Image (cartoon, grey):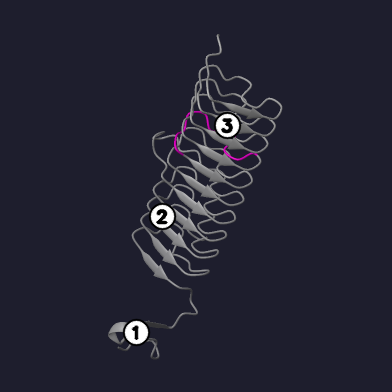
Amino acid sequence: TANTQSNCTAVGAYSLMSNTTGDYNTATGYGALEQNTTGSNNTAIGHFALEDSTTANYNTVVGKDAGTAITNGIRNTVLGYQALQTNTNSSYNVAIGYHALYTQNITTNPAGGQNVAIGDRAGYDVTDGRNSVYVGAGAGFNVTNGGENVIIGSYCGTQLTTGSNCIIFGQGAQASANNVSNEVTIGDSGINKFRIPGINFILKDNGGTPTE
């Protein structure tokens, strides 16, 4: 096949090696964007970054083995060692941190995804879950198929696996069960007082009966 690509930059052995008509790609590092043929507007920096991409577009991937399995996913932003590594078709994800969204590979709706994971191993075990936010080291580490979750805090929500539409805030805060849905949790078991200073509102533990 004739190579008609334009405005591409490749630095490193095997980088952009298979490119034919993909335009505006930048590949830096051994094997970066190695399999890309027609995908365009991608930036891959790092050893084997975006290696398996063939028709993927508008992805920015930085880190060794980051986004390696992405083939035709679009508009993913990835930064970190092996972040979003096993993702193939899922799109619109942000994975920042070592092993962030490491196992994600949404197959039921390839156009889906829209997950944001920021932090060391944040959202590590997500497979089919979508439309979620994980912020903090290990946040939502064990969530697999649960979606529409907001989990913010170091090692927060690690108990949750398949629950959906949960909001969990605070370091070490956990859901009431691994499959619970539609629940809000603020803080861990050590929190015994809730206050809103601006309106002088306080709830606290008073021997088992909250008082205002």
Mark number, residue 43: none
Question: 2 and 188: which one is in front?
Answer: 2
Question: 11 and 184: which one is in front?
Answer: 11
Horizontal relation, residue 64 to residue 101: left or right: right
- Between the residue at mark 2 and the residue at mark 1, the CA separation in whole angstroms equals 32 Å
Question: 55 and 190: which one is in front?
Answer: 55
Q: Secondary structure at mark 1?
A: helix
| Quadrant assignment, res 155 | bottom right
Vertical comparison of 142 with 21: above or below: below
According to the picture, the residue beneath numbered tag 1 turns out to be 197
User: At label 2, which amino acid type do we have?
Assistant: Gly
Query: Disc count in the image?
Result: 3
| Residue contact between numbered discs 2 and 1, judged by CB atoms under 8 Å | no
- Between the residue at mark 2 and the residue at mark 3, the CA separation in whole angstroms equals 39 Å
| Dot 2 alpha-carbon crowd within 10 angstroms: few under 14, some 14 to 19, many 20 or more | many
Residue at 60% x, 19% y: name it.
18
According to the picture, the residue beneath numbered tag 2 turns out to be 163
Q: Quadrant of the N terminus?
A: top right
According to the picture, the residue beneath numbered tag 3 turns out to be 26
Q: Earlier in the sequence, mark 2 or mark 3?
A: 3
User: At label 1, which amino acid type do we have?
Assistant: Pro
Which percent across, then down, holds residue 12? 70, 30
